Image: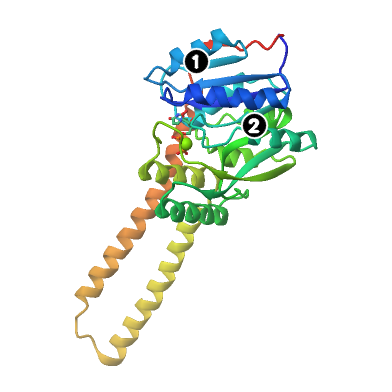
Amino acid sequence: MNTPDLSIVVPAYNEEHVLPSFVERIRDVLEKIGVSWEIVFANDGSRDSTAALLLQFHLTDPRIGFVSLSRNFGKEIALTAGLDHARGSAVVVIDADLQDPPELISEMMARFNEGFDVVYARRAKRVGETALKRVTASAFYRVINVLADRPIPRDVGDFRLLSRRALDALLQLREQHRFMKGLFSWVGFRQTEIVYTRAPRAAGSTKWNYWRLWNFSIEGITSFSIRPLQIASYFGFFVAILSVVYGSIFVFRTIVYGNPVAGYPSLLTIMLFLGGVQLISLGIIGEYIGRIFNETKNRPLYIVAERMISDTAP
Ligand code: UDP
Ligand code: MG
């Protein structure tokens, strides 16, 4: 079986409304670039007719393959499943919803041919996103870049090109908690960016809500930094010093002015404060222990239900 020059990896979860136009548009782009290509869809346990559509695509164009997971595993893992099956010398990761313009792929290929291993697309403007989403996104990047050991480029999604060696490096990272932006950054090599304007979703609806985004942020931070644990211990240290100072003031006051037993409110305040600090610290530790627990189970990342490998032979 020939290895294609370029593999396009597309995670898809309930994307029946957008897939036909996606395939049409990306095929146009790929034909214009003029390299041999394959498309690998990762069907993330879709419950609509996505699976049937993918089979249809494969039968009409064997360069389109897919891997169907046994259930919904989440975008990060679906993406990994797709990448595991990609055979190209370069791989582009793109969303199925046409928010990432496929036209950018030719520019990515140009950068790849200049010798870059990772070409990521940075969003210049976010069309169709609320002000709240923009503010929270910006806060997220600020926090994670203070905490994480590796820089995470801001406003960069998963839309990017990877060379074969960068992909092989990435695929060695088999952790369960997959914060892809961080993993992409971790592998290193020569990385560069191109800037584009992110379009609103073409059809269908986003699977993100604020609760999921919040959990995603915690995932990013805990996967790439143990700083929160250190912050907890420094904070404990700080509170301990404070209590010594406070205690000394009491001893001093009792010696100088006698002891008019008072201080019930201050006692209560301090108790509640310390209780809160302890619970927060325990919670932070818990976040990490939960992740250790998940990693030690050593389960496979995903289960394949069905796959159709693309065939790029002329
Ligand atoms: N996706 C997936 N599994 C999921 C959720 C999403 O494979 O559990 C895919 C989805 O089909 C799309 C991409 O991931 O191709 C991005 O999803 P979405 O558009 O919902 O996210 P957003 O663009 O809002 O970040
Ligand atoms: Mg989207």
Distance between the alpha carbons at the discs numbered 1 and 2: 26 Å
Q: Report crowding for label 2: few under 14, some 14 to 19, many 20 or more residues within 10 A (C-alpha).
A: many
Position of residue 247 measured from the top left corner of the image (x, y, whole percent): 35, 77
> Residue shown at 54%/50% (left/top)?
125
Give the structural element (helix, strand or loop) at label 2. Answer: helix
* Mark 2 C-beta closer than 8 Å to ligand 1: no
Q: Is residue 299 visible?
A: no
Q: Is residue 268 visible?
A: yes
- Residue 85 horizontal side relative to residue 205, left or right: right
Count the labels in the image.
2
In the depicted structure, whether residue 118 falls above or below residue 45: below
Q: Which residue is identified by label 1?
A: 54
Q: Which residue is identified by label 2?
A: 170
In the depicted structure, whether residue 237 falls above or below residue 112: below
> Residue shown at 53%/56% (left/top)?
142
| Between 204 and 186, the one nearer to me in the picture | 204
In the depicted structure, whether residue 31 falls above or below residue 288: above
- Residue 283 horizontal side relative to residue 114, left or right: left
Q: Report crowding for label 1: few under 14, some 14 to 19, many 20 or more residues within 10 A (C-alpha).
A: many
Looking at the picture, which amino acid does disc 2 mark? Answer: Leu
